[in-house]
Image: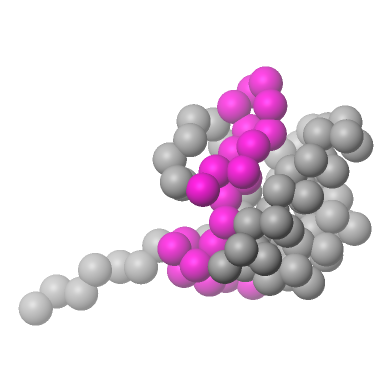
Amino acid sequence: MVQKKIPMRRCAGCMESHPQKDMIRIAWDGESLKVDQTGRARGRGVYFCRNAECIEKGRKSRGLNRSFKRNFQEEELENVFRELLMLIKEV
């Protein structure tokens, strides 16, 4: 029996690889950043672990700017990180 390969993604906060299903995706479609809870939104994606420490590391190290190779507005970044933290607290 052939085992399926598990897709792995690297966290933009801690820079460790984890299974994709255990991560939260942030999508950028060329116009705006948004938290992609379905994992199927259009655009490039960056992943974060589902813990507050990794999200804070990503915020401090400007992980989204580095991964997308852009400088986003602070307000836009704050909205995304706030939504990420709320999403983690729900689970």
- Residue at 20 percent of width and 74 percent of height: 3
Q: Nearer the viewer, residue 70 or 29?
A: 29
Query: Does 30 appear above or below 34?
Result: above
- Residue at 48 percent of width and 35 percent of height: 41
Q: Nearer the viewer, residue 1 or 45?
A: 45
- Residue at 70 percent of width and 56 percent of height: 86
* Residue 2 percent location from the top left of the image: 14, 74
Which of the 4 quarters of the picture holds residue 88?
Answer: bottom right
- Residue at 54 percent of width and 31 percent of height: 43
Which of the 4 quarters of the picture holds residue 33?
Answer: top right
Q: Is residue 86 left or right of residue 53?
A: left
Q: Is residue 45 visible?
A: no
Which of the 4 quarters of the picture holds residue 30?
Answer: top right
Residue 22 belongs to magenta span: yes
Of all residues shown, which one is farthest toward the bottom? 1
Q: Nearer the viewer, residue 67 or 32?
A: 32
* Residue 10 percent location from the top left of the image: 60, 62
Query: Does 34 appear above or below 48?
Result: above
Of all residues shown, which one is farthest toward the top? 31
Query: Does 69 appear above or below 5?
Result: above
For the C terminus, the image quarter is bottom right
Segment colored magenta:
16-37
Q: Is residue 26 left or right of residue 83?
A: left
Of all residues shown, which one is farthest toward the left? 1
* Residue 61 percent location from the top left of the image: 87, 57
Residue 44 belongs to magenta span: no
Q: Is residue 89 visible?
A: yes
